[in-house]
Amino acid sequence: MTSTEETPPLRPTRQRIAVAEAMASVEDFRSAREIHELLGERGEAVGLATVYRTLQRLAEAGEIDMLRSEDGEAIYRRCSGTHHHHLVCRDCGRTVEVEGPAVERWTTAIAEQHGFAAVSHTLEIFGTCPGCSAARS
């Protein structure tokens, strides 16, 4: 497959459907291991390697978002279909989708300044949510 070809859609196997349903049932970002554990709790027999591959393919297809936690682990969440960024709580993992028009303007300007085209970007902002901040006080 060349880099210009799209990834073919996933064949809807029982395991892939179970992973997609698990992702739809959670609101925060989860690692592949956490999704694997959730599937086990539900009585779904899905191998960890299958969970990793399925999450990667769903992210490539734009069906879920993938970001890297502060420690570098890939974490996943079903998100809205529009371009957005995330505020992520370091303590509880709570995530808020945010738009960033200033970021979009800056990205376009800096790319044009350096002659880049077809630019994409991600932005994750890590901090402590109000609930976790209050619990610390």
Image: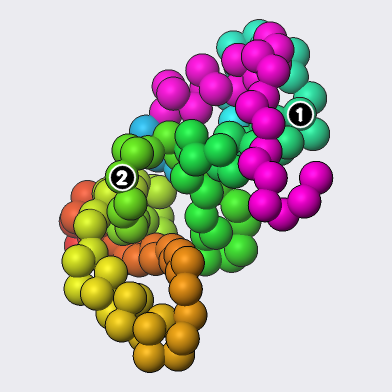
What residue range appears in magenta?
A: 1-26
Question: Which residue is at 32% across, 38% downward?
Answer: 80
Does residue 71 appear in the picture of this structure? Answer: yes
> Can you give x and y, in whole percent of width and height, for residue 47 in the image?
79, 25
Q: Which mark is residue 50?
A: 1
> Which is more N-terminal, label 1 or label 2?
1
Tell me the quarter of the image containing the N terminus: top right
> Can you give x and y, in whole percent of width and height, for residue 90 in the image?
40, 59
Question: Which residue is at 65% across, 41% downward?
Answer: 6
Residue at mark 2 to residue at mark 1: CA–CA distance? 27 Å
Report if the CB atoms under discs 2 and 1 are less than 8 Å apart: no
The stretch drawn in magenta includes residue 13: yes
Which is more foreground, mark 2 or mark 1?
Answer: 2
Residue type beneath disc 2 = Thr
Quarter residue 9 falls in = top right
**Residue 124 vs residue 136, the one in the foreground:** 124
> Can you give x and y, in whole percent of width and height, for residue 51 in the image?
70, 31
Tag 2 residue: 82
Quarter residue 100 falls in = bottom left
Residue type beneath disc 1 = Thr
